[in-house]
Amino acid sequence: MQFVWKYVDDLVGKGLDIGIILELLFFVSATLVPLAIPLTILLSSIMTFGGLAEYYEITALKAAGISLQRIFRPLIFFTLLLSAAAFFFSNYVLPLANLKMGVLLYDITHKKPALEIREGVFYNGIENYTLRVGKKWKDGKSLSNIMIYDHSENRGNTKVTLADSGVMEVTADKRFLILTLINGHNYEEGESENGKNDYKPYVRSTFKKQIVRLDLSDFKMMRSDASLFKGHYSILRAKELLAAVDSEEVYTQRRNKINYSQLTNFLMSRDLKRRGFESRIQPYEKETYVEYLRQLPKADRMQVYDAALNFARSNSSFVESGKFEQEVRDGNKVRYYIEFHKKFTLSIACLVLFFIGAPLGAIIRKGGLGMPALFAVGFFLVFYVVSIIGEKSAKEGGLNPHVGSWLAIAVLLPVGIFLTYKATKDSVLFDMEFYKSLFMRRKIYATGAKDSANL
């Protein structure tokens, strides 16, 4: 739904087939699978063990000598399989889904809006033509008071067609719009022979029926070549992401050497040698530029100052350009690293959230979709928000990309260990009945103490 609301303006009014929309939503759904699997494991584990604890089945298993760790064991193996499947999905299926979704979304957003000719409004959506219809009848085809401006020759409004009525039809392949005009006139203003505006030929013709064919190929959605989008970090596998990082580092090293070479060529001493100023100074006076400049005539000294100022400005612009390029390259490396780690963090999150959900369900002792769903959404929001904070901080340079990518796991892993320990020790940490009975005991104790005081 977030995707639909975000791109609703690009989808509405394009005349898209239902098959294209379903295809786009299918690829969007595929991109959400790695994020949905951890939430599914968290919710299902809370509901499962909450239901077992609510009906004292865990108590019966423990009474039979089966520990909670042994109860968890088969589900741990199953969660490990799901984690491995999530990794392979993120590494192989998700890049392909991102590629297909990106290409299809690009084609949709660059598609022209559907042909919509309204009454009394000039419509210029068709290339080289402007149309105006005075009346459009209920059948959607019959038209009255038609005006067509032909701009195919790029000479302005020099060719105009007026018709009393007509019929509008689109060919079966939707490539052409056929306008059958009835009872009208053609007006065309030619070009003067001498290039002046004094005398121009003017042609007027009358027709009873005329057929105009307008090209609608621009309205058809063209499929782009997927190879044009293969450099984006979201469509690369783990091995390709590491290769992209190495490529960025190699390019940075090579670029730094080139920058250093160019900066050394910009030194003022090189320019002084080229201009011949150095030959006018004695050898022992070349140790400092101050002494060097004092030996120059005033005109030459001013020329050196101007050259130094120009070189300083050139160096400053060159350094700023190199700095900006380096920031872009560093940002690309951070994105590559984050995308690389996400293929692992989402898989590990499945295991971590299981060790939060399963013991939490055993502790709260509630099944169904009530309290388990509340706890599941709460913990998942913590996981999601911390993940976003880590990624944003890494992209902005506040955190190392390796640390930012694993920040959510680092926050939730101690919680999972703590809850597993509490569930093993039969803790009543989230048992509402325990707190209710404790409150009632305290209330009864307070009431008895008050009665004793009154007596």
Image (spheres, rainbow, N blue to C red):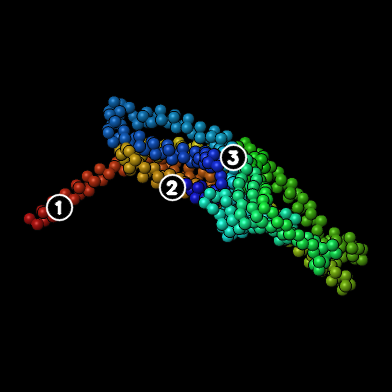
**Marks 1 and 3, how far apart in space?**
70 Å
Residue 244 visible (yes or no): no
Q: Secondary structure at mark 3?
A: helix
Which residue is denoted by mark 2 in the rendering? 382
| Of callouts 2 and 3, the N-terminal one | 3
| Of callouts 1 and 3, the N-terminal one | 3
Assess whether mark 3 and mark 1 are in contact (beta carbons under 8 angstroms): no
Q: Quadrant of residue 272?
A: bottom right
Q: Given this view, does label 1 or label 3 mark the residue nearer the observer?
A: 3
Residue 281 located left or right of residue 445: right
**Marks 2 and 3, how far apart in space?**
31 Å
| Of callouts 1 and 2, the N-terminal one | 2
Residue 213 visible (yes or no): yes
**Marks 1 and 2, how far apart in space?**
41 Å
114 versus 424 height, above or below: below
Which residue is denoted by mark 1 in the rendering? 447
Please name the residue shown 49% across and 50% down the image.
Answer: 5
Residue 432 at what x, y percent from top left? 27, 44
Amino acid under disc 3:
Lys
Amino acid under disc 2:
Val
Q: Given this view, does label 2 or label 3 mark the residue nearer the observer?
A: 3
Which residue is denoted by mark 3 in the rendering? 100
Farthest-out residue, left: 455
